[in-house]
Each structure stands twice: as structure tokens, then as C-alpha cells.
Image (cartoon, rainbow, N blue to C red):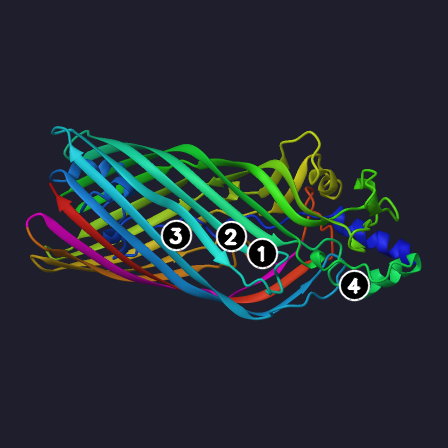
């Protein structure tokens, strides 16, 4: 009876291992590519032409710059996400021990550089280097939800050559082609059939063999890692319409950045069951579905490292924005922006083997119910809208002051929020300014604060048919606050 129960334990965890979670963010898109735009909470972005960073915001704006210019800057995103009331169960529904409250730091530096120059009265060109997306989070190793999330990193760097054409005094168009390089990494502990939490039961089940205590503590240190990179090409189309001297309207479309991240999927300390013993003399096989005993150590056998070539697709979705800049007086102007992002295209994360027969997928595909699948995480994200309003005031001939607010909806439905991306709707407030240092140099500074709605998560594991496959679960409450600092130097050549 004990052997039968242990067999059920091993089967329910080995065959149901869906190695979640993959890095995606509540919008892992970031906006920090222009300090001058950040001062208004990015309201009017694309319609306000002040420096070479307009290349990212709206390629058409290059035609309105008075001459060649260089903008170099960066933002620092920092804050803290506090988690509390955390509870977790393993694949058998048994409680997991560990840290039930704590926090992880948010810390990202986002540099950028842009150069722009007129070619003649109608044409202008430029090139930019920036990060359109990034995310980073790390939990303590004792985090009770370590089987769902540990380290999450994603960075995308883009090089964008751009060309713009002034159709008339009132209307310009522009096109940017972005060549993007992405790196992603995620790690987590993996619960293999509750083997970590059931040492006493396992020792008792193997006791009739006369081998003594056989539980292997390495089963509490089973970790997986996927570390990969890819290149992609995307496009930005922009138009700038100035119907009169006080009004500018911008239309900007960014195509999707489609990535295929391929590399070895690695997992450590995996139990070696009898069926995988391969006739080794140093292993004592109890049953095909049960962990063999390593005769060298007297403990249940484990493989230090298993690898399998795999890939996953990841997309930064297409988006479209409309922005307006309206001068009210020579000193005062108002800005507004509305952006749509096509997050509903993000239906799931799938890690799929590139091998005909792999040591990991041959275990996971049975429970995931699809050949070659190593992991599957349903996302079911939704399209989002972001609204921003700003005010700019020319304090003096050399000083311009700015402020703005923005509301950004989360693409993640409540039932799909995860420990890797515990985000909700956000409100931003920013303040900034521009200083004319001399005839050649200007300086932009900005500060922002983000209020994020308190949120909770309730995670499970699923197969490709979106059916729950184990009793593994993680619940937690999150409170996240973020600050932003940004600085930019502009040089007019």
C-alpha cells in the first residue's frame, strides 16, 4: 500500500511538471526613452518636438527640429514590491514551508541616445539606441512561492535608423526600422511530486528494503533555468499634423516585436526513476515509476543536471497612439495622449522542445497533453489603454516647467496574475523641467511616482487545454510603489 501511494506521488509530480513561470510583465513595455516627455507624464508625446528623442516618440517630428542635435540620457526606475499573507501548496496539495511575507526591490537603469539631422528642407534622418522593454525581479530562496517564481529578467535593446519627410508645412511623415536584441532569464525551484515535503513517508515506504533512511535532501533543491536571446526587426510609423500655429496632432504606430528565445532548458537534481535507470550497476531499482536508490550514497538517486534544447515565443505587441499639444498662450500649453496596446494577442507562454525525444519533455508532455511541450502557462491578457494629461509653462526664456498625470490599465486579468508579474492598474504623476544652459546645451530633469492598485494572486498549474493539472497553488497580496528619476542632455550641433 505504501509503494502504491508513493507511486501516485511520483506520477502526479513527474508527469505534471509544467515548469512555470515565464517572464512577462504587465506590460513589460517601458516608457523611459525621453526625459523631456517624462516631465508631462508622456502626455503629448509625439506632438511636442523639443529634441532628438522625438525620433522614438514620433519619427515624423524629425522634420521640425531646427538643426542637427544629440540627446543622451537615462532613467532610473526604483521601488519596492511588498508581499504578505502568502500561502502555497505543493502538487499534492500539502503546505509548503518558507517566508510568508517580505519584499523584493525594483531597480532598473534605462539609458538611451538619439541623433537627428536635417538632410534638406523636406527630408530629415536620425538614429536612436534605447530599451523598449525590460523587467527584473528576484525573490529570496526561502520565499514560500519559490516553486512558482524566483528570478525574472528581460531586456530588449533597439537600434532605430529613421527617415522623415515633410509633405507640407502642416504635415510630415516618418518611418523608423528597429533592430532589437533581447535577453531573457528565469529561474525557479520545482516541486517534483512533493518529494521535498514527504521525507518521513518516503523513508517509511522504503524501510522494508532494509536500506535505512533514503530521502535525498537534493529533492528540496530542484531548480530550473532558461537563459536565452534573440534578434528581431520591427517598424514605427509616425505622422505629425499642425493645422495651425498653436496645435500639433501626432499619430504613431509601432509594430510588434516578435521574439523566439531558443536555448537549453536546464533543471537540476531531478529524481532518477527506475524506468530511466538504464541498467546502471550503481542504482537499485524498486519499480519503474519510483526513484531508484543510489548504492554509492544510500539515498534516492538524482541527476545533477538535465538539459533539453527548447524554444519559446515572446511578443512585445503592436500599439497605436494619438497625441495632442495645444498652445493656450505664449507661456502655457496643454498636452494629451491616448495609447492602445494589443496585449490580447498574448494568449499563452509555451516552452517547446526542439528535440525529437528529450529527457524533460518525455516526462512533461503527458500531463501537458501535447507532444514536445515542456511548459505551458495560459495568459489570456487583454488589450489596454493609457491616458495622459500634461501642462507645460515657460517660466522664463531659459526655464520651462512641466507636470502631468497618466492612467495605465493592466493587461492581466485578476485570475491570471502571477508572482512574477504582480501588477494592476497604475496612476503616474510626474514633474520636470528644461533648462537652457547656453546656446548649444539644454538639460532636462524629471521625477515620477507611480501608485499601483493593491493586488492579489491565486496561481495554479495548467495543461495545454487550460485544465488545472495539480494541486499546486500560490496565493499572496502585493503592495507596489515605484519612483522614477530621469536626466537628459541635449546638444545642438
Tell me what residue is drawn at x 84 percent, y 53 percent.
8
Q: Is residue 80 magenta?
A: no
Q: With 311 as the anchor, is 394 left or right in this view? A: left
Disc 3 versus disc 2: nearer the observer: 2
Q: With 112 as the anchor, is 490 left or right in this view? A: left
Q: Which residue is mark 1?
A: 149
Q: In the image, is residue 401 above or below residue 56?
A: below
Q: CA distance from mark 4 to mark 2?
A: 30 Å
The dot on residue 152 is: 2
Whether pointer 2 and pointer 1 mark residues with C-beta atoms closer than 8 Å, the reply is yes
Q: CA distance from mark 3 to mark 2?
A: 25 Å
The stretch in magenta equals 439-460
Disc 1 versus disc 3: nearer the observer: 1
Sequence order check, earlier mark of 4 and 1: 1
The dot on residue 386 is: 3
Q: Which residue is mark 4?
A: 199
Sequence order check, earlier mark of 3 and 4: 4
Label 1 environment density (alpha carbons within 10 Å; few <14, some 14–19, many ≥20): many
Q: Which secondary structure, mark 1? A: loop
Amino acid at each position: 500500500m505504501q509503494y502504491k501511494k508513493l507511486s501516485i506521488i511520483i506520477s502526479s509530480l513527474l508527469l505534471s511538471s509544467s515548469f512555470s513561470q515565464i517572464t512577462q510583465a504587465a506590460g513589460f513595455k517601458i516608457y523611459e526613452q525621453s526625459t523631456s516627455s517624462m516631465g508631462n507624464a508622456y502626455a503629448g508625446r509625439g506632438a511636442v518636438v523639443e529634441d532628438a528623442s522625438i525620433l522614438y516618440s514620433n519619427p515624423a517630428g524629425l522634420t521640425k527640429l531646427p538643426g542637427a542635435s544629440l540627446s543622451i540620457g537615462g532613467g532610473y526606475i526604483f521601488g519596492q514590491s511588498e508581499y504578505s499573507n502568502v500561502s502555497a501548496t505543493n502538487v499534492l496539495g500539502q503546505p509548503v514551508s518558507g517566508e510568508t511575507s517580505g519584499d523584493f526591490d525594483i531597480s532598473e537603469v534605462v539609458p538611451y541616445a538619439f541623433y537627428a539631422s536635417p538632410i534638406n528642407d523636406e527630408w530629415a534622418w536620425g538614429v536612436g539606441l534605447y530599451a523598449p522593454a525590460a523587467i527584473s525581479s528576484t525573490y529570496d530562496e526561502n520565499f514560500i512561492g519559490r516553486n512558482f517564481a524566483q528570478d525574472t529578467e528581460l531586456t530588449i535593446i533597439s537600434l532605430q535608423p529613421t527617415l522623415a519627410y515633410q509633405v507640407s508645412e502642416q504635415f510630415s511623415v516618418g518611418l523608423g526600422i528597429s533592430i532589437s536584441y533581447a535577453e531573457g532569464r528565469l529561474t525557479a525551484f520545482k516541486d517534483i511530486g512533493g518529494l521535498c515535503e514527504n521525507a518521513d513517508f518516503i523513508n517509511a515506504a522504503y524501510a522494508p528494503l532494509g536500506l535505512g533512511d533514503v530521502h535525498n535532501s537534493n529533492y528540496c533543491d530542484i531548480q530550473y533555468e532558461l537563459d536565452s536571446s534573440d534578434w528581431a526587426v520591427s517598424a514605427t510609423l509616425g505622422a505629425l499634423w499642425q493645422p495651425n500655429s498653436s496645435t500639433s496632432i501626432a499619430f504613431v504606430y509601432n509594430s510588434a516585436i516578435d521574439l523566439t528565445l531558443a536555448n537549453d532548458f536546464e533543471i537540476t537534481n531531478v529524481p532518477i526513476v527506475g524506468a530511466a535507470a538504464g541498467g546502471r550497476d550503481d542504482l537499485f531499482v524498486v519499480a519503474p515509476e519510483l526513484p531508484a536508490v543510489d548504492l554509492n550514497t544510500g539515498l534516492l538517486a538524482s541527476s545533477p543536471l538535465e538539459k533539453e534544447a527548447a524554444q519559446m515565443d515572446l511578443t512585445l505587441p503592436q500599439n497605436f497612439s494619438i497625441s495632442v499639444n495645444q498652445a493656450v498662450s505664449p507661456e502655457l500649453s496643454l498636452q494629451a495622449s491616448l495609447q492602445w496596446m494589443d496585449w490580447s494577442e498574448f494568449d499563452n507562454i509555451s516552452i517547446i522542445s526542439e528535440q525529437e525525444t528529450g529527457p524533460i519533455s518525455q516526462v512533461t508532455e503527458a500531463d501537458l497533453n501535447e507532444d514536445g511541450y515542456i511548459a505551458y502557462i495560459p495568459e489570456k491578457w487583454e488589450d489596454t489603454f493609457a491616458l495622459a494629461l500634461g501642462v507645460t509653462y515657460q517660466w522664463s526664456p531659459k526655464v520651462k516647467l512641466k507636470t502631468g498625470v497618466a492612467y495605465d490599465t493592466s493587461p492581466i486579468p485578476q485570475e491570471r496574475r502571477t508572482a512574477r508579474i504582480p501588477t494592476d492598474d497604475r496612476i503616474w504623476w510626474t514633474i520636470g523641467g528644461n533648462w537652457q544652459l547656453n546656446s548649444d546645451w539644454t538639460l532636462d530633469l524629471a521625477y515620477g511616482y507611480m501608485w499601483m492598485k493593491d493586488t492579489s494572486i491565486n496561481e495554479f498549474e495548467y495543461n495545454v487545454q487550460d485544465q488545472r493539472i495539480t494541486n499546486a497553488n500560490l496565493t499572496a497580496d502585493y503592495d507596489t510603489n515605484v519612483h522614477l528619476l530621469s536626466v537628459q542632455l541635449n546638444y545642438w550641433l
